[in-house]
């Protein structure tokens, strides 16, 4: 397959939840492509560690903030926009703890709804003045679970569906300003989150096997291939895309084998 | 009759779509629990409905849907339940920049979390009767509207809740989402009422639909009963658009 490269020199991006997993892969890809990247995660330590893994330098900004709180999202944006510019907002942070309906308590529900849905609204709200100026771009990392369901994940599924719907509302409202907003709906990626879910299941090998089977393509996605597509969504190649919920799921929402 | 012997709780049923649905359930044999935020409104609705249908199969309970404890209290006050209709909701418009945290939180609390809390709390009762949950969504679950980010998010999430519950609770409990399009209720009138030209605003809503008109509450109520019907045995996880075609097609 041909390698696609982008040049994001001079652009500034905020990636939430970039301490590890897909967020880290997106930050890495953007940084490689020349962008200045603000790395958000829950703690200063995890941001610093991610920045160190990326090699450090003036093109990397630490933007620690707990997005589950009411002012965390605006705080992350404030750190990212210290230079007065923002082109790309990538709402990637999430929690995903599987629980059956009967074991889902208020704290669990609120954490998922706040990190996945409310924080994505609040970062966009805070970033809006900058995005207007740059005619920038929002990518909300949803999930295939923003489009259909599996058992034992009610809070996450509700929040991800809400994120897809909110993306459409934002796209419509912001279309006249030149700001594009899209939702990306990945299938299962082999990230730390997946590894945790596998571990929690008690039988990691069959957990992985089940998810390999679940995706018609027969494997999990790598964070890097999803990150590459995020860069594509931010580019002029996607200049006519807004309000889309794009699946990148190895075929799992397309049909049944 | 279709709903003979069935007990139905309809939240947000002191007016609008909820009242219309409650009246139809009653007319077709059901026992109805009305619900509203204020006890006085609930009492008035109970009196109105029982007089109109000369029936004693109506009672009422009040609870603030933005208050989880109150929702759980409501669930405890119900002995047996066949059908839960999560119809209570709020619609507050605001541009992204003008949306307060309070508006966001209240919209999510009432339109989404209340439906979740009630579904969870009433689950043992619904399992016992192999019951049905009907969540009242909106075309805004699937269509983005400017100035409605919080509302769209809440209704989109309600579709997610529907699918997640349907997946997990099958085959005991059927769970559906019935999505009305623009409907002539106080909710819509409040929105139209703040527009500079009321008739133009109504026509604007109407123009989103293929039928080129807003719905009457009873039309939506009919669709809710369709989803809740004991004859609809193979419907679950469905997102049913009662939207005059709004999500199906668009005029150029
Ligand atoms: N892994 C998958 O299979 C998969 C599938 C579909 C969608 N997704 C989505 O992709 C995105 C990335 O997932 P991942 O697998 O990389 O997850 P991950 O758990 O590996 O990484 C998520 C990151 O978000 C951060 N985060 C969580 N809560 C936060 C908070 N309150 N404030 C700030 N940061 C916070 C975490 O610290 C972590 O660094 C998420 O939105 C997830 O829902 C993942």
Image (tube, coloured by chain):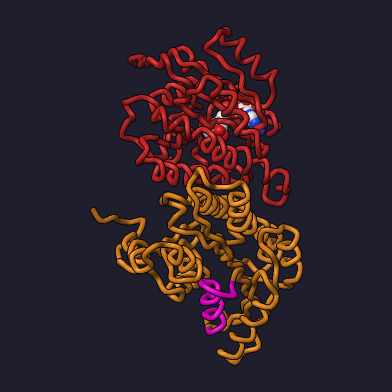
Q: Is residue B205 left or right of residue B107?
A: left
Q: Colour of chain A?
A: red
Q: Measured along the vertical axis of the image, is residue B248 above or below residue B47?
A: above
Residue at image position (68%, 37%) is: A69
Q: From the top left corner, tell me how far across and down residue B109 is, in percent.
A: 63, 54
Q: Position of residue A151 (x, y in %)?
A: 60, 46
> Range of the magenta residues?
B13-27
The residue positioned 70% from the left and 43% from the top of the image is A108
Task: Report whether residue A209 is seen.
Answer: no
The correct choice, above or below, for A153 with respect to A5 in the image is below
x%, y% of residue A158?
57, 47
Q: How many marks?
A: 0
Is residue A60 or residue B119 the one in the foreground?
A60
Quarter where residue B59 is shown: bottom right
User: In the displayed structure, does residue B81 sit left or right of residue A11?
Assistant: right
Q: Which is the main secondary structure of the residues drawn in magenta?
A: helix
Q: Quadrant of ligand 1?
A: top right
Looking at the image, which residue is at 35% across and 41% down? A176
Residue B37 vs residue A98, the one in the foreground: B37
The colour assigned to chain B within the rendered structure: orange
Placement of A196 over or under B11, stated as above or below? above
Q: Quadrant of the N terminus of chain A?
A: top left
Q: Give A77 or A52, whichever is nearer the viewer.
A: A77
Query: Can you give x and y, in whole percent of width and height, for residue B215 in the image?
Result: 40, 70
């Amino acid at each position: 397959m041909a390698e696609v490269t982008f040049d994001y020199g001079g652009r500034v991006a905020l990636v939430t939840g970039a301490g590890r997993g897909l967020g880290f892969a997106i930050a890495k890809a953007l940084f490689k492509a020349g962008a200045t990247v603000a790395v958000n995660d829950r703690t200063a330590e995890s941001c610093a560690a991610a920045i160190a893994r990326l090699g450090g330098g003036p093109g990397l900004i630490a933007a620690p903030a707990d997005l589950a709180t009411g002012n965390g999202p605006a705080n992350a944006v404030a750190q990212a926009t210290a230079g007065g510019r923002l082109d790309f907002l990538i709402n990637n942070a999430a929690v995903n703890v599987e629980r059956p309906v009967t074991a889902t308590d208020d704290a669990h529900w609120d954490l998922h709804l706040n990190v996945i849905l409310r924080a994505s609204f609040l970062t966009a709200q805070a970033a809006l003045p900058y995005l207007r100026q740059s005619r920038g771009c929002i990518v909300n990392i949803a999930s295939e679970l923003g489009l259909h369901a599996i058992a034992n994940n009610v809070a996450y599924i509700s929040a991800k569906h809400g994120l897809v719907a909110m993306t459409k509302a934002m796209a419509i409202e912001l279309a006249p300003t030149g700001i594009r907003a899209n939702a990306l709906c990945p299938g299962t990626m082999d990230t730390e989150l997946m590894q945790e879910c596998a571990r929690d299941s008690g039988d990691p090998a069959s957990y992985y096997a089940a998810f390999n089977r679940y995706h018609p393509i027969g494997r999990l996605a790598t964070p890097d291939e999803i990150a590459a597509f995020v860069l594509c969504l931010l580019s002029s190649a996607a200049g006519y895309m807004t309000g889309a919920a794009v699946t990148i799921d190895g075929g799992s929402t397309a049909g049944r084998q | 009759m279709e709903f003979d012997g069935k007990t139905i709780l309809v939240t947000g049923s002191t007016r609008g779509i909820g009242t219309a649905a409650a009246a139809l359930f009653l007319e077709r044999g059901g026992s109805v629990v009305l619900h509203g935020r204020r006890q006085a409104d609930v009492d008035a609705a109970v009196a109105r409905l029982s007089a109109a249908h000369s029936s004693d199969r109506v009672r009422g309970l009040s609870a603030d849907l933005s208050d989880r404890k109150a929702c759980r209290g409501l669930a405890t006050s119900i002995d047996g339940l066949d059908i839960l209709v999560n119809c209570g909701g709020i619609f507050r418009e605001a541009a992204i920049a003008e949306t307060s945290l309070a508006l966001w939180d209240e919209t999510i609390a009432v339109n989404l979390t209340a439906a979740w809390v009630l579904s969870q709390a009433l689950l043992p009762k619904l399992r016992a009767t192999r019951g049905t949950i009907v969540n009242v969504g909106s075309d805004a679950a699937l269509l983005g509207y400017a100035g409605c980010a919080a509302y769209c998010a809440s209704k989109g999430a309600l579709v997610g809740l529907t699918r997640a519950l349907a997946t997990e609770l099958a085959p005991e409990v059927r769970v559906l989402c019935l999505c009305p399009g623009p409907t002539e209720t106080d909710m819509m009138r409040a929105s139209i009422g703040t527009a500079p030209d009321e008739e133009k605003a109504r026509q604007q809503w109407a123009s989103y639909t293929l039928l080129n008109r807003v719905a009457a509450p009873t039309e939506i109520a009919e669709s809710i009963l369709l989803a809740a019907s004991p004859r609809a045995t193979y419907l679950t996880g469905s997102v049913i658009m009662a939207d005059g075609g709004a999500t199906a097609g668009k005029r150029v």
